[in-house]
Image (spheres, rainbow, N blue to C red):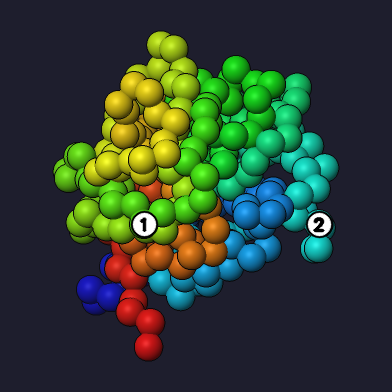
Amino acid sequence: MFARKIAACFLLFAFLGVVPLGAAQDKPVRALFVLVGAGGHDVEKNCPPLLERIKQVGGIEATLLAPPKGKPGDGAHLAKLAEVKRADYDVLVFYTVGNKLEGDAEKAVQAFVEEGGGLVALHGATASFGNSKVWLNLTGGRFAGHAPGTYDLLINVTDKDHPIVAGIEPFTVNDEEYTYKFAEGVKRHVIGQFRERPAKSSEKNNNNDILWTIEAGKGRVFHCGLGHDVKAWSNPSFQKLVMQGIHWAAGKPKAVSIPKDK
């Protein structure tokens, strides 16, 4: 009898177009990974460790907007951002460098976030689209340089209560040390900083910010300045950080467990 009542409730929900809360929470976050970058930022070499981890852990449905195979620095596909709609994805994840965000693509990305979509900007994303003030305001800053090479950088969590850093203790990642020129009038909530910078850092204002969030319209932005190369993308703490950032940006905060590799 009880089972029949439960079945009847689900039929009623389906008829009314209502998804039960539990079912809605079980749906994976639809994330569009927007990728372009060659050399040290080669998207074909760097991204697979995280994408494979996402498949292993679940909870995120990753779709790629990527260059043709063998041409990781070709940005022609970025024009397709003009077709991005809030109904199709929950989060846009950018791992890009250089290029331009033109006209309709810029408008579509801005509308996506302001209408409630999430944006995750990784590493070279702030060294992208220098022509776009919209992009600068969405991400909160523009890349302004780094000490030559990569370093073992210790990252401190500055807001332990934030869902993106749930379960993440201070961690070390071999990565580039980015500095920024911050967007004027944009309120950033800093959740992680370098404990210290390399001696050759170009940072002049004693600012160590590297992880922050921004509220933009109805949407949520997570900036993560880490992720230079495959070593960083293979780092379990980086993977946990990005995956939890995707869930948070989607409006569905979730703590993610990263299995230990055998």
- 200 on left or right of 110: left
Task: Using the rendered view, name the quadrant where residue 63 is placed.
Answer: bottom right
The residue at which mark 1 appears reads as: 152
Query: Residue placed at 28% from the left, 75% from the top?
Result: 3
* Residue 137 sits above or below residue 200 on the image: above
Mark 1 → mark 2, Cα distance in angstroms: 30 Å
Is there CB contact under 8 Å for labels 1 and 2?
no
Question: Split into 4 quadrants, where in the image is the C terminus?
Answer: bottom left
The amino acid type of the residue labelled 2 equals Lys
What is the crowding at mark 1: few (fewer than 14 residues within 10 Å), some, or many (at least 20)?
Answer: few
* Residue 220 sits above or below residue 252 on the image: above
Query: Residue placed at 41% from the left, 54% from the top?
Result: 151
Query: Residue placed at 20% from the left, 39% from the top?
Result: 158
Q: Residue furthest bottom?
A: 262
Element at label 1: strand
Q: Residue furthest front?
A: 199
Query: Residue placed at 31% from the left, 28% from the top?
Result: 207
The residue at which mark 2 appears reads as: 71
Element at label 2: loop
Q: Residue furthest top?
A: 185
Q: Nearer the viewer, residue 31 or 100?
A: 100
Whether residue 94 can be seen here:
no
The amino acid type of the residue labelled 1 equals Asp
What is the crowding at mark 2: few (fewer than 14 residues within 10 Å), some, or many (at least 20)?
Answer: some
Residue 27 place in picture, x, y as percent: 44, 59
- 90 on left or right of 131: left
Q: Nearer the viewer, residue 136 or 13?
A: 136
Q: Which mark is residue 79?
A: none
> Which mark lies nearer to you, 1 or 2?
1
Question: Split into 4 quadrants, where in the image is the N terminus?
Answer: bottom left
Whether residue 235 can be seen here:
yes
Residue 107 place in picture, x, y as percent: 67, 23
